[in-house]
Amino acid sequence: MNKFILGTLTATLVSTTAFATESDWSGLDREIEALSSTLAPAGEGAAVHGWIHVRWDSSSDFMVGTADTSGAAFSSIRLNATGSVADYKYKVGFDLASGSASLRDAFIDWNFTDNLKGRLGNFKVPFLQSVLQGVVGRLMVQPTNITSLFGANAGLTGLRDAGAAVMGHFDMLNFAAALQNGSDGQGDEYRTTFRVGADLMGEGAGHNCEGAYGAAEGMNLSAAVAYSEDGAITDSAMTGFEVYLTNGPWAAAGEMMDNDKAVGDNTPWDATVSFMFNEDYEAAVRWEDRDDTANTNDLTVGVNRYISGHNAKWMLNWRTTDSDSAVLDGDTISLALVLGF
């Protein structure tokens, strides 16, 4: 592993989208104008919200062409519109980080009962909480490897797919069941996903954000199991397990995913511990085992400075990857600013 100066402010990873060109942004302006004119339903206004996640990555181990990585990029720029018409709620969301509007969410919810609702449209696959977690609520600059692996193995764009789902919450139990298009699109095979969770202590943990910041008082514990399989691909089942715990200034989380033959034939896992050392700062450590053929492990150490909770925070991470593959082996420092609005 190459040496690098830890004082360097973080910049874009090789895989991260760079800033858009001036011509890209000109086109984006027109797209946003057109988008805003279509998001307001007749007779009712839509609530517009979203976030900006910008980062600066620095590494002498991962190259951009022939140069060291050192620069800024948008991880995500999200614009969402939510509202309701009669008893139906809707959400339409676009990501703008590439300089053009890319559809993310577009779904309609309705209630069967007070505890049971249906969903139809394009939405996140209801797998593990790290997959469902929004950018604003993350504890680290990058999502867990399991989140990335699930998206890659499922062949999904942004971990989303079109389909239908039923979701419910009954006392300490919650569940979701979804039928989504899967790899054959509108063919007659589906991606089938089931998730069952339980709040075992207190108000539960990990539902809205990762880490200890903003957690309910006392000890809170949640656990869940999830299963997802693409009917068009033989041996494509993925089974996930998770646990989240908060207790005062402490938080801990762990997850594991068991992949069938067609989607890796491996069992990656990770564990995270964080501590609020005052009301505005949280330190965290995450260990991840990819369980790949290159014996790749990742260690991430980070600290967050909360300005206005998760809606305005600075994130500083040092991530070191140990692997038999020279392409994966190396260190990166990342500094990110997240604003939710």
Image (cartoon, rainbow, N blue to C red):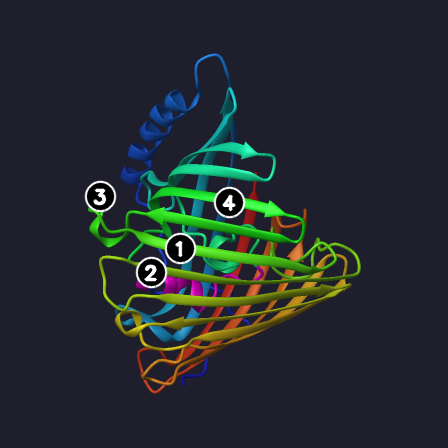
Q: Which residue is mark 1?
A: 193
Tell me how far mark 3 sits from mark 2, CA to CA: 16 Å
Based on the picture, tell me whether residue 213 belongs to the magenta stretch. Answer: no
| Secondary structure at numbered mark 4 | strand
| Secondary structure at numbered mark 2 | strand
Query: Badges 1 and 4: C-beta atoms under 8 Å apart?
Result: no
Query: Badges 3 and 4: C-beta atoms under 8 Å apart?
Result: no
Mark 3 residue type = Gln
Q: Nearer the viewer, residue 48 or 289?
A: 289
Tell me how far mark 3 sits from mark 1, CA to CA: 17 Å
Chain part drawn in magenta: 139-153
- Earlier residue among tags 3 and 4: 4
Tell me how far mark 3 sits from mark 4, CA to CA: 22 Å
Q: Residues within 10 Å of mark 2 (few under 14, many from 20)?
A: many
Tell me how far mark 1 sits from mark 4, CA to CA: 12 Å
Q: Nearer the viewer, residue 42 or 127?
A: 127
Q: Residue at x 44, y 18 (%)?
A: 41
With respect to residue 305, does 299 lie above or below?
A: below
Based on the picture, tell me whether residue 145 belongs to the magenta stretch. Answer: yes
Q: Position of residue 323 (x, y in %)?
A: 38, 84
Mark 4 residue type = Met
Tell me how far mark 1 sits from mark 2, CA to CA: 7 Å
- Earlier residue among tags 1 and 2: 1
Q: Which residue is mark 2?
A: 229
Residue 186, which numbered label? Answer: 3
| Secondary structure at numbered mark 3 | loop
Quadrant holding the C terminus: top right
Tell me how far mark 4 sits from mark 2, CA to CA: 18 Å
